[in-house]
Amino acid sequence: MVEGPLRKMLAGMDDRVHYALTVGQAHLPIDDRVGGRLTIRATGLMTCVACGRSVKKFFGQGFCFPCFRDAPEAAECIVRPELCRAHLGEGRDPEWERRHHDQEHVVYLAHTGGIKVGVTRSTQVPVRWIDQGAVAAVIIARTPYRQLAGLIEVELKKRFADKTNWRAMLRPVEPDMDALLHARSEAMTALAHELGAYALSGEETVSIHYPVDHFPPKVASVSLEKGPAIEGTLAAIKGQYLVWADGRVLNVRNHAGYHVEVE
């Protein structure tokens, strides 16, 4: 048994995605548990993912209120990259912004059950696609810093979704490369202006395969706050979701900072 604060799962990919469950300082390979038993039990302790302070309530994804208000990891430009000011030497923590946001970013299209547009730092490919449960993705633009990628995303959100429907994603979804390439052509047309200088029409598509035994016909999100233990047969791992055979689903990323015991 391992105990400690939960963090988002680590993910990597060769012919399929490989996951490790991060609990405290431990990284537990979890792919081989698909089809077997897994128990996650909350201890009742909650600590901020940024400062480690013990809290009774989280703000955002695992932050205490002061860090939610002040930490660069919780800044508005995390979810609205068009607002980023890192390239101007500004932000909640200019040095953090320089390392994370004043860097090359990509705009991509991903097939998660539908086609969506997104932005991530280039060094986060393909991890960001995996975190969103994409079965296929393609880069459509590269920019020297985050804000420019955000402006491209704003333009493309007029045509494509920018959110993942988690219920649709947690079903058997086959990569539809034709739909993805058609969406890229549509995006290239939409970017035929000054932002088009960053557009890319020749990047290779990537298909992504997850550790799955089966997907239950119906799924229901569960919370460690409302039900302190989840146990049973693990049926699938996709995105940042653990899926049990009875249809219960735990969004691991949303439970960052919860202290758990894992068996």
Image: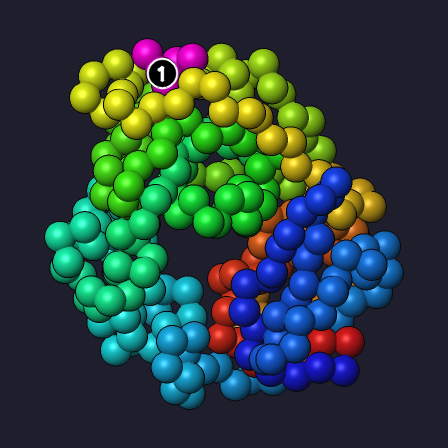
Which quadrant of the structure image shows residue 62? Answer: bottom left
Q: Secondary structure at mark 1?
A: helix
Q: Residue furthest right?
A: 36
Residue 20 shows up from this direction: yes
Residue 230 picture location, percent across and down: 70, 68
Residue 168, compared with residue 242, is above or below; it is above
- Is residue 163 located in the magenta-colored stretch of the structure? no
On-image quarter of the N terminus: bottom right
The residue drawn where x is 36% and y is 42% is 105
- Residue 26, x across and y down, in percent: 65, 77
Residue 215 visible in this rendered orientation of the protein = no
Residue 250 percent location from the top left of the image:
61, 59
Extent of the magenta region:
185-189
Total marks shown come to: 1
Q: Nearer the viewer, residue 131 or 259?
A: 131
- Which quarter of the figure has residue 199? top left
Residue at 57% from the left image edge and 58% from the top image edge:
251
- Principal SS element in the magenta part? helix
Q: Is residue 197 above or below residue 222?
A: above
The amino acid marked with disc number 1 is Met
Rendered position, 39 above or below 152: below
